[in-house]
Structure formats: C-alpha cells, structure tokens
C-alpha cells in the first residue's frame, strides 16, 4: 500500500484537518519520504527513540503514535531530536502522528476506549477545546464506590506498576463519570460545572487537588500513558480489518506517568 | 506595620519587579486595601479557599503564598475565584504572592531550601527562565545511591503520604544534583546538557520518562507541594527576625501532588 | 430566583455571547457566588464604589450596570478595584454587566432609548463594531434646528447640570440623526459617509471638532452618562414585568461627563 | 535652510527617536519632499485641513504641529486624509509633527508650559509612558483654592469660550499639582498614588469622575486644545532665536474640546 | 462618471472585499478625493512616479494599477512616497489599485491572460493563498518542448529586452502547465505536488533552483513585469465596453525584472 | 576534533548568538548528533539534497553552509525536507549553518569578500538589520564606469553562465559602492539615502527597477549565488589554518540566480 494512501485514510477517519488550528502537534505524516510503501506498521503511544528502534527492529515501514516529535516546529535536528529521527531515517520508517484527533474520535479515541472499559452509557462529548471535545462523559449502570473505581482502573490499565491516585472530595457513590485522558488538569472546572461525580484523567497538576476540593469532585489520576493506549490499539484493530493485509504490532512501553 | 511597607520589604528582597515580564503570576500584593496594617501573617504554599479560611480563622491580617490567584488576569470574580476571594475580603486579609521570585532567591528560595536539605556544595544557578534561574545545582560531599536519595527526600519532605517516584536512567552513584522545584518538566534537557547525575523536581509530565531515558539521567519526582514549602517557611523565618514583632504561622496543607 | 437563571435570561435577551470577541468588557456575571438567589436588584450606569455601596444599603442581591469592573482582566484586587469589590463581597451583592450588548439592543439599548426620546422613525443600525452595531440612526418627522435639538437633549437628559455642547458645521435643518451613546468619537467618519445631518453622542474627543468640520456635520455632545441611562432603565422595566416579583431600584449618579 | 537640517535640529532637541516605540504618532517629518528648503514656518496644535490651508495662504514652507495625520500608518489617502494632504502637496508645505516628544520636553513641552503658567516649583516628571513621562508635577508657592485654580486656568487658556470643568473631591487647599495635558484620563491613578492635591488635564472621560472621587482628588478639565498650545508656541519662540532668520507665525484654532 | 461609482464597479467585479485579510496591498481606491469624476483613465502595471507623471501628462482623471503605493500602511509621505503622491495630488489623478484580486480573476486576471496566450485548456485554480488562488493551471493541446515554451514566452511578452530563463529539471515534453505571475517563488512546492510538467512564473528566488531540481520540475522565469500586464489590459478592455464613453490608455513601462 | 568544539569556535567567531532574534535561519548546528567528531568538512553556499549528497560522497563529517534547512522551524520532515535530511542522517554528516552572521562578518563575510574583490577602501557597515549590518560600503581608488563594473563582476563571479544585469539610473562614474549580497532588494532606500553611486546586490525584485530610478542609483544584479560564495570560502580558509589538520573541500554548485 502506498504511504500516501495509508496517511490519507487515517487523516480522513480522524479528521486531521479539523484540528490544524487547535493542536500544537503537527498531526499526520511527520517523518517520511511520501513515495514509500507500507506493509508492516507498528503502533505505540509515545514516539521516542526506544519505540522507534523497536519498530525498526521489527521491520516496520511505518510507526503510528499518539505523541510525535513536532510540537510547534522542530528548530534543530540535534540532541534528543536527532536521537529520535536517526532510527527512523536510517531504517526508512515513516512516522504518522495523531494527537488530539485521536483523543477526540468518538469510537476509536482514547476517551472512548476508557469509557468502553468502564461500560459507560449515554455518552456525551466532554473536554472542550475550541469547537471540538477531547474527552467523553457517561453514566455507569451500576454505581461505583471510590475504591471500586480505583481498583477497576488499577486492574485494567497498563500503569507500569504505579498506583492510581484518588482525590476524593466528591460523593461516595459514583454514577456520572467524565473522562479526560493524558493531562486532564484543564478540565476540572468543566467537570465541576457539569456536576459529574468523578473525573478520570491521566496526569494531574498541583492545582488539581484544590480545584477538586473546591468543586466537590472525585478525581482519579490513572496515569498519562495508562489512559492513552486505547486510541493507537483501536487504530491497529481497524487497520487489521483492511483488505490490504497490513501486518501490525503494538509496542507497549509503559512510563508509569 | 503598614501593609504597604510590608509589601515593599518583600518586593525588595525578592526582586519582584525583575520578574514582571517572566512570570504569569502577578507577584506582590494581589488582594488588599493597601492602606491596611499588618500584625499577624500566615504563610503557606497554595493560595486557595482552604488556606484563606484557615488564615482568617487564625486572625491573619495578611497571607503570604507561593501560588496566588491571578495568573494572567482575573476575568471574573465568580465560581472558584469567588470562593477564594470572599474569605479574604470578608475578613480583611491581604494576599501577598511570590512565585518565580521566591523559587529563584539564592538563599530563601525553594530550590535553595531543598539544596540545603541535601547539603549540596558549590552551588550554581540552574533552571533558566530568560535572564533568571529558578533552580539550583550543587555537589554532594558524599555520593548518594538512588535509593539513599529517594529515602532522604521521602523522609524529610511533606509528601502527604505519597511515595517519591524515581526514574533511574542515570549513574548509580549520584554526586552532581540539579534541583527544579514544583513542575520541573521543562528542565530535563538543561540537566542533560549539564551532565548532572540527578534532577530532583516536584512534578513531572509524561514526556519526562523518555527525556530522562534519552539523556541518561536520574529523575526524582518528590512532589510539587513537598518541594515548595521551603520558600514560604524561609520568608516566615525572615519576617520573624524583624523588629516589628509580627506574629506568624505556617499552614501546612500537603496535596500529595 | 436563582442567580444563575437571572443571568441566563439577561444573557439570552442581550445576546451576551455574540459580543465575546468584540468587547473589552467581560459581559455577564462579573462578581458573584453563582449559587446565590436574587430578590432585589439595583440598576445603574456605572459600577463603582459609590453605586455598589448604595446598592448594598438598599439591600440588593444583585446590581446590573453598563460599565463594570473587568476590562481585559483584573490583574490585582487592590487599590481602586479593592474599594469596588469589597462592598459587593461584604454584602453578598452580585454584579451583572452589559456593555456593548446593551448599547446594541434594538429596543432596550441605550441608542434605542435616545432614539425613542427624539421620536426618530425609519430606524437603522449605526455605529459598526465588527458584525454588530452599537448605535442607531433615524429620521425626525419634524425637522429640528440646531438649537431645538440641543434644548431637547438638555431638557430631557440627566446631564448633572452640565451644558450640551454643539459643534455645528452641518445643515441648519436637521432631519436625519445618527446616535452613538457614550464615547461616540469613533463614529464621526461613518456619520459623514452616511450623510446624516447630525450625530448625537455622549462624549467626544479633541479630534471630533475638525472631523465634524471636515465632514460638514452637526455634532451634539450630550454627555457620556446622560446618554447611557436608557439601557439599564429599560432592563429594569423589563425585569419588573417578570412573574418572579423581583423588586428593583434605579440609582441615578450623574457624572456630568 | 534645508528642510532636512530643520527636521534634524527639532528631532535632536525633542529626542524624537526615543519615542519611536512609545507613540502611535509618526513623529518627525510626516509629509514633505525632503530636499525642500524652509524660510517660513507656521506653528499650530492640530494638523488638519483648516490649519494647512491657512498655513498655505500665509506662504509657509513648513507647518509644525502637535497632532499630525499619521497614527499607526495611513492606509489610504482618501476622504478626510486626502482633504488634509492635498493643501500640503498642492502648495509644497512640509508637515513636521511632534506628539509625545513635545508633551514630554522638560522646558519646551506642553506640561512644562502649563506648569510655568501656574508658577509651580520643585518640578518632577509625571505621567509615565514606558521609560518616559508626558507630564509634570510641582508645588505652588501659594496654595490655590479650587475656585482660584479654575479661574486662573479659564482666564489664561485659549478655551474657545468653553468653561473649565472641576471635579472637586480633593482638599480645599491645593498645593501639589500634577499636570497631564490633552487626554489625561489615564493618569488619575498615578495622581492618586502620588498624593497630589489636584490633577490638571485637558480632556477627561466618563471614568474620570469616579476615579477622582475614589482617589479623593481634585480634577480640572481645562480642554485638550487649551492645554496643548504651549509646546508649539515654545518651539516657535526657539526657532525665532536661530540665526537663520526663519519667519514664523502661530495659527490659533481653538476647538473648545 | 462619478469616481465612487467607478470604484464600486471595479470592486464588485474583482471581489476586492474578499481579499482584505489576504493581501498586504490596500486594494481599491488608494488616493483620491472620492467626490471626483472620471472621464479619462490610464492603466499600467506599476504605480510609480514615472507612470503617474505620464498619466498626468495624458490628462488622466484616474490611473488603475496592479502594484500600488500602500502595502500595510504609509507611515510617512516623504522621500520616494512623496515623489509618487505629488504628481497624483498636483494633477487631481485618483489611484485605483488591484493586486491579488486582479491576479486571481478567472477571466480578466494576470494568470488567466497568460493561460490564454498559451491556449491552455481544462483550466483550474492554482497558487493557493488562504481560500483564494492567484494562479491557474491547464493543459496544452499540443505539447511544448522546453525551447518552444521559452521562445513562445520570449516572443510574446513585454520582457524589456531581457531573456526568459529556464530551469529545466522536468520532462522534455510539456503538457501540464501551472502559472504563477509576478513573484512565483512560493508556488514551486504546490507545482511539484500537483505533478505539472512546468511552472511559468515571473520572478524567482535563489531557492527556486534547488526546489525545482528536487521536485523534477521545469521552471520558466519570464519576468515579473512581463507576466503582469494582462490584468490591467483586460480591465482596460472591459472599461472600454461600458456605456459611459470613458477614454483609456495603457502605459507600457517594462522593467525587465 | 569534537563536533561540539568545532561549532563553538565558529559560533564565537561569527557571533551567532547576537543574531538569534534577527534571523529566521536557525544558525549554528542544525543537524547532528552533537557527540560526533569532525575530520573532513565540506563548504558550500546552499544546503540542499545535491550538496549534501556530494558532501557524503566525499566523506564529509560536517557540511558548512550559508543557506540551511530550518527557517522558522521544520514542521514536518517529509517531501523536500526528507530528501535533504536523509543523506545527512544516513551518512552521519552534521550540518552547520551561518546565514546573517556570515553575511555580516567584517572580514570573512560575503559583503567583505565582494568588497575585497572590488578593492574598496574606507569600508563602513551597510545594510542595516536591527542593530547589525549585513553589507558593506566603500570607495574605489579608481572610479569604474558602469560597463567596467559590470564586466568586473561578470568576469570574477561564479554566475552559472548568466549575465550581470544593470539598472543604470546613477552617475556614469562610480566611486562610492554599497554591497548587499544575496537578496538586496530591501536596501535600495538606504543606498539612496547614503548617496552612493552604485549598489551591488545579488538578486533584485520587480520593485528594484523603479526604486533605483527614483533614487538616481546604479544597481548591479550579480546573482544571489554568485555574491554569496565568499563567506563559506573564507570560513574554509580559516578552518584550514587551525592546528587540528581538518581536511576541507568547497562544493561549487552555481544556480545562476
């Protein structure tokens, strides 16, 4: 399959163009000779030297990631950036990136995958970024206690051995759950305003504690990496269904963050 | 003591004006009637409803914090902001804020305090922000192992019961230590370029894991709150030495973040 | 009535959201605990310490003003701003602001009220600001002389004892009248281009004299305050018609400017 | 005298270059063929069609004004701008402009001239604009009452028949006087902070009333034009002293604003 | 014919308003007394002193140009700008400018005229600028060789005696041709991506050589002036068809650039 | 020699840091693994695929160029950029870039080299860019005629077979010469104001013709490439003098532009 066509299919499904002015990430093809072909594709969350080297070892023609290497432009291909670009160029591996478009996809996205895990119903978009939303909210058919929700997350996610932290200023019984994968710290006010019982996010910040307290909200910090493998794995499953017989692999490199 | 004079002394010592274009925080007096007087001053890290209410209960005339309420301007005094402003105004408590100026102070600052704790020698500025530095680096007279340094931090800091996380891609023996309190995630490249053995920071981000790995660096995540009580406590000690007989208290509200 | 619902009704009627990118004023609720309730509402043109104190004395739950306290963000709640915020917070008075949305409203607005006073017919929007208009123009059924129009304005408006100034470079007989309440100095060119006979504004600037002269236009400076009481008084009348039995008052504090 | 040399002498004395980033006005030569010569120069406050035509009628080679025609760039030489440019070009009259540099000059400037009129002593800069000041403050050897100061201003200034308005929330006896000629409405807070007894300005705005009230300040609105003839008349006197025998005239066109 | 109406007709046909945010040129009337009338109109590519003087000598009431004098605002009417404005004002010649709107017009525009010359078929827009296109592409019914296309251009265009330069890294046989008149150097990547055989432009830059080489593209540098006389001559022809009997002339001043 | 030290020596000599805010080019090391070493260095004007491949074929460890690949940041390493980066990464060739710093250097720079060629005396900086100058001016001991100067340039420079174009609106006898290598089109006004007899530049624009005419100036367009080989060849000579025994080569790829 031509690399160009591979990228176009993903761009179409993920509406890459709609996020051009919203996302610092340069989504779509970030590294690649455009006239290449694609038979083997690796999927992973972070586009870094370790995953690029593993993709090259596996014989990938392309690697699809959530976190790429171009955030507002690469000034110099030196130091850390050189260390990331070199294995791609040396082994002719193209890099395709989908950041907010992949968070945002209503079925394939990171928040959608986490909402599936929690079996939330009555889904609605959550986590407003301009005209788009990068999260989801929904309702649990059976309420969770704080401990049950933490244990569910800790048991199912790839947390790299780190605990799931809770900030439990909300109700004991949790039915309405909002999800903001990755860095969710900007969405506590929206969760407070929408009167959900809990906000599940990846990574918080210092301000998250008091914002949760003042909003009377339960916040679960399940890990940036742990909450953001859904999107790339869903893309992998989707690519597997194509007629082109593309071989795929998922590279799991948990960071515990 | 007149509130105006109180603020001027702090502004002079902390060089507040030099940070006007560097810091999103509006440093100096953020809330207050300017013609007030100051006899009792509370010190704490976070300026939030909980600490403002405790300061008011204690009878404070002013509260001195590291994290204030004006970051690039307050558009509306509603919701969470109203909940923070109201206890100050209702009880005539002035709010004095010092963010980057307090990180940066070579003796009283947060990084200085943490470097004191680790008994680092040959101190130099670290953590460049424009023409200023918000961290420090130095050399341990006796090398730490990774475990020893983690245990020292966990044992001495107010971590709110949370563990100190290590990302140990650096040497086993740690002599040269860089410090960036609070959110230190922007300073991994500088630490890598300066060939220190370890970077001690408060709070990291997802990117920190692979940046540390690619730089061959040990990173210690000791907690945003836990690494940022030094500055306000040092200010408290300094104010206690004045002739004016100001009464002080420190309000410890660890967030575990 | 819940404060939230009170604000929503006004926001809907005044189309507050449509002015978000046009107006430096943060329109809508500027100060308030959001979960409050509203039974007594004061209306006035200027949101300042004097009017806030009078509203508090009268027992207002909310005060609705044309000129609020947040214009591009409040950096510090100190000095003059503290003096304005304190009476609101101390007496639990919410502050609702409508600047350009209230100038612009086709029936309730300031320009509409002044056009009603002059009995102008064939009204059209005037005073373009982006896609909106903050003034009106219309035609007098009986022409005014310059003196008649000045005397009408001086007789009917709350000018605080100050004269209505005329710059009379236009025709002796005035039929077509444009209105730009408050600071109208940006709209002389538009009035010149549209060939009206007179522009009635509140406050002018030095440049207004020669711009009027070069455009061959009569300009009437009737006072910023004097031309901007219509909107808040119309809002008051409208709120009085609601079923909720809200008690209202209008606080008249002419500035003579 | 060559026009180039004429402009350079004024630019040097007025420090035109130091205001390049502070002033919207394009100070210095705004219209002119650079290789022209100068024998007759008209001086006036406002650079407008009326004054340019009068300058041309008088046979001026150049006209020196405080308010020019280029404020942030001329997009089109049409309409009002064409009406101003045409008499200059048609009669080969060069236009030299000095806005903030002329407000600011410590001896020749507008504020300096008004301070001379009031015989203020112990002069200091007032009215901060970046690193410069556009006003002055000083101390009257004999205190004024509010009425005395108003009458002095009304009697001496070219007010075009308009009254001097007072907003008298300050002390009855006025010793310390700050001066901000032209539009002085941005300087009420500085006057309040510096505890002067009165601020004399040209033109105010609606907000001036309450700002003066809340600062406990006397404000005198003496007219934009009336307070800004000093600078150009002082320049005229200075040019008269040159050896080149340049003939001069002052064109007095009061606006009453 | 009134000048205002003359300008409105051109603005309508050329969709001047749609280019307001895309073009540094202030399109439409740039110099003129608005209330003037138009009986004789000169057309030329460059609005400069030489063409303005020739237009005035011919007795023009207006001159219509592709390159005007206001690009992002005129700060001062001095030096070169004075030398251009003076002949217009002195002889009451209005200046009408159409830059990108005239490049872009699908029948009257510069690219359209050059595509007519080359008898290109199946025309499509080329040369994207925001939502507009400033060039065209099309297909030659009979293929050109590189030499044939160069000779056609050299033979038909007003090149001022300068050669047409070719950079011939594309195919020997040229069927698909893209056109970007004037400075075409920004459009080599678009031409490369669209797989045309040749890009005909006016003026290139240093980077054009290697960009053409790396894209495998033939580039023809036919001259900025030489490729941009079509638009103004097409406007001239169009104005000639009006009922108003306007007399016209075309002023040919080739620059050889 | 370590690559880091190689870059530091060049950065020091060329004052790379002083141009950080003036130059769109990211000067200094643009591509490279920083911990590399340098024994063989190629020098050329343009950093493009062709020169990078030739440098790799020659066995270069580094290539030093005037025109690099990062101008305001690389958004994606795809298409043309991939084609340029790949030969560098594949063959471990580092890329060092010096744009304005190399134009500007008083002895080694491009303008200096061209002034040497013309044997100009009494050199002064010319071509102001912020606080720096990117050109030079000087005086010929024996005056040139226009033809003599053109022939000198055509005879000595690497013009790729293209003629040197003259725009000869200046004096017949040329003594004072200003030089702006590469794209010199922004410096015609400065040359006009400084009353030089001729401006020698690389590449002009359409506007250059009339600007030269209106300034009464001779302009010589000697080619962007042809005027910008001096700097890199001077750097080569300088590196040859070092004790490190670095082998060098110059890659001459004239563009004729």
Image (cartoon, coloured by chain):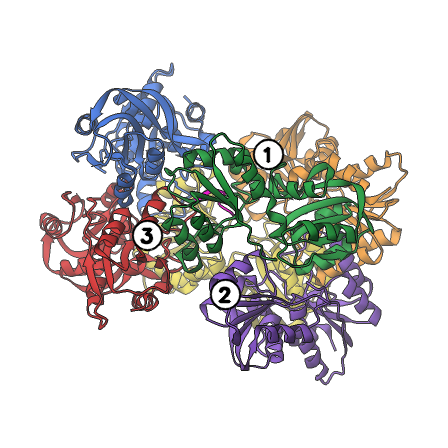
Chain colours: A green, B purple, C orange, D yellow, E blue, F red
Residue B208 position in % (x across, y down): 55, 60
Q: Which image quadrant for residue C240?
A: top right
In the displayed structure, does residue A91 sit left or right of residue B85? left
Q: What is the x, y in percent for residue E202?
A: 27, 35
What residue is pinned by disc 1?
Answer: C131
Protein chain holding label 1: C
The residue that appears at 33% across and 61% down in the rendered structure is F132
Name the residue carrying label 2: B130
Q: Above or below — where is E9 with respect to D251?
A: above
Marked residue chain, label 2: B
**D47 and E186: which is toward the camera:** E186
Gap between marks 1 and 2, in whole Å?
41 Å
Q: Which residue is mark 3?
A: F90
Q: Residue at x 82, y 39 (%)?
A: C236
Q: Is residue F46 magenta?
A: no
Residue toward you, D105 or C154: D105
Q: Secondary structure at mark 1?
A: loop
> Which label number is shown at residue E137?
none
Label 2 and label 3: CA atoms lie apart by 36 Å
Indicate which label's residue lies in the foreground, 2 or 3: 3
Q: Is residue A224 visible?
A: yes
Q: Which image quarter is the N terminus of chain A in?
A: top left
Distance, label 1 to label 3, CA atoms, is 55 Å
Query: Which segment is the magenta one?
Result: A25-30
């Amino acid at each position: 399959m031509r690399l160009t066509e591979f990228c176009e299919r993903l761009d179409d499904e993920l509406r890459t163009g709609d996020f051009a002015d919203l996302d610092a990430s340069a989504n779509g093809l970030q590294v690649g000779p455009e006239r290449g072909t694609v038979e083997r594709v690796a999927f992973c969350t972070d586009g870094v030297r370790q995953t690029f080297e593993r993709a090259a070892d596996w014989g990938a023609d392309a690697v699809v990631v959530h976190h790429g290497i171009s955030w507002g432009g690469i000034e110099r291909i030196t130091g850390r950036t050189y260390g990331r670009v070199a294995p791609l160029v040396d082994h002719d591996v193209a890099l395709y990136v989908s950041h907010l478009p992949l968070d945002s996809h209503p079925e394939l996205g990171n928040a959608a995958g986490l909402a599936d895990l929690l079996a939330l119903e009555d889904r609605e978009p959550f986590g407003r970024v301009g005209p788009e939303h990068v999260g989801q909210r929904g309702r649990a058919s059976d309420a969770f206690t704080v401990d049950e929700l933490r244990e569910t997350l800790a048991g199912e996610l790839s947390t790299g051995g780190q605990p799931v932290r809770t900030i439990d200023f909300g109700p004991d019984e949790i039915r309405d759950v909002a999800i903001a994968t990755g860095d969710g710290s900007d969405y506590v006010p929206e969760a407070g305003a929408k009167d959900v019982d809990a906000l599940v996010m990846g990574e918080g910040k210092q301000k998250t504690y008091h914002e949760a307290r003042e909003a009377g909200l339960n916040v679960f910090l399940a890990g940036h990496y742990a909450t953001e493998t859904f999107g790339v794995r869903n893309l992998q499953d989707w690519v597997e269904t194509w007629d082109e017989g593309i071989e795929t692999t998922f590279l799991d490199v948990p960071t515990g963050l």
